Amino acid sequence: MAVHKHYANAPIREALIDIRVEMLPDIKLSSLDEAYELIRVDYPTRNEMKFVQSEISLVGQGSTSTKQEIIGYRFSAQDGKQIVQTRLDGFTFSRLAPYECWEALRDEAKKLWSIYQGVARPQKITRVAVRYINQIDIPLPMRDFKDFFRTFPDISSDLPQELGGFLMQLQIPQKDFAGMVVLTEALVPPARPNVASTVLDIDVFKMKDDFGSDDAWNCLEVLRERKNEIFEGCITDKARDLFGPIVM
Amino acid sequence: MPLATQNARPPAIYLPLSGQEAEGPAFTPSLGDIRRAVEASAYWRALEAFVRAEAQLTEFSRLTADWDSYGAEPPNATARESAAQLLGILRTSNLPPTRVVPSSEGGVGICFVNGEAYADIESLNSGELLAVMYTGTEEPQVWEISQNEESIKKAVEQILDHLTS
């Protein structure tokens, strides 16, 4: 069942489309950087993405080693609201608030993906994901988080019920399309006075030995539907009231 | 739907303990995966930067006079409260600071760096707010910001433009 509600004040803070790949062994970072020339008009800010790895050995006297390597680039739009990552292991496009709609997100991601595909020539697509990060600001005072959330940590009634903070992550297999939902819910520092800010981070993905390009984009549509169902399934009508009327 | 009904749920099935196999590839997230999920998101990275900035600001209340051994005053409550308000506005504008530092002029400096572009806003013990921005060896542009939300938002926009141009 497709759930396509578009709230006037949707709590989406970031929407991401992520595609992981396997590269040919001879691919170089400089190839990823070639994308910059093709997108710099719309994405002028370029930053290196680094991977830092530390190792501690407890053998003998003990030793530590840290290595840092560049794994790709992050290109941002002038206003910082749209970001594309081109990495040796994949591609990510993200849109920060204000979020427009799925079609705009998907079409821009598709355009940038074809540029990435052109310069990086990935051998295989191994994982596709749709991830939406929502921040729901609940006005204070409130009675119970459960008035707003249907998926929430349960505290035994034998324990004190005051909650100073929480971070919960659930992995929920999606049997019908052999995928996975990683649902992260956390209380974060309030966005402004007199609200409790809760993040609902919904990451829906599917892994496969090799998706074809068309197959990957068709799969992203399925993941997006599931993301909507998960979001609606996690909240109550009282939370929906915070997001304003449904608009077409 | 009444809230009680919305909250009712059947018992959860934990697949590894139920003898059922999850379809599709196994997924056991490691700390590395969690880190990677944070790194992939501009929202989480910014949030992390704000949490770090607020923690740094809290630490400044412990500084004592001559903290820099050159006779600097520690940031007072006025400077710290004003800096906290500024961090709130920066969060709304999605502009996380690179660093928050005590100022040798007496106050708090909120600094931004993007490549060669630098900017900071100093929240001084006197209650004044000063903004500075420059690129490389350029002559710095310095101006005073009025203590109201509109002026602060305007200065933040100028800084954002400077850092991303």
Image (cartoon, rainbow, N blue to C red):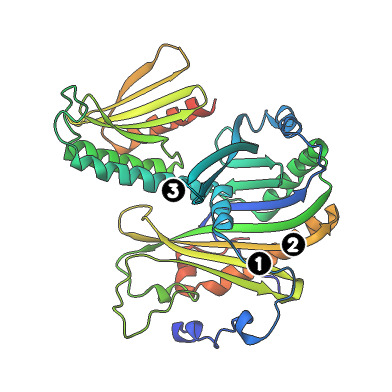
Say above or below: A61 vs A70. below
Helix, strand or loop at label 1? It is loop
Callout 3: residue from which chain? B
Q: Give the residue type at disc 1.
A: Phe
Helix, strand or loop at label 3? It is helix
Taking B100 as reference, is A126 left or right?
right
Q: Give the residue type at disc 3.
A: Glu
Query: Where does label 3 land, which residue?
Result: B48
> Could you classify mark 3 by the number of other residues whose Cα lies within 10 Å: few (under 14), some (14-19), or many (20 or more)?
some
Q: Give the residue type at disc 2.
A: Met
Q: Is residue B1 visible?
A: no
Callout 1: residue from which chain? B
Query: Where does label 2 land, which residue?
Result: A207
- As drawn, which residue projects farthest toward the front? A60
Helix, strand or loop at label 2? It is strand
Q: Residue at x 31, y 77 (%)?
A: A161
Quarter occupied by the N terminus of chain A: bottom right
Q: Quadrant of residue B96?
A: top left
Please tell me which of labels 3 and 1 falls first in the chain.
Answer: 1
Q: Residue at x 48, y 25 (%)?
A: B162
- Determine if marks 1 and 2 fall on one subunit: no
Q: Residue at x 61, y 61 (%)?
A: A203
Q: Position of residue A88 (x, y in %)?
A: 71, 42
Q: Quadrant of residue B134?
A: top left
Q: Residue at x 62, y 29 (%)?
A: A44
Q: Quadrant of residue A248?
A: bottom right
Residue nearest the observer in this picture, B75 or A50:
A50
Q: CA distance from mark 3 to mark 1?
A: 26 Å
Q: Is residue A226 visible?
A: yes
Q: Position of residue A78 (x, y in %)?
A: 58, 32
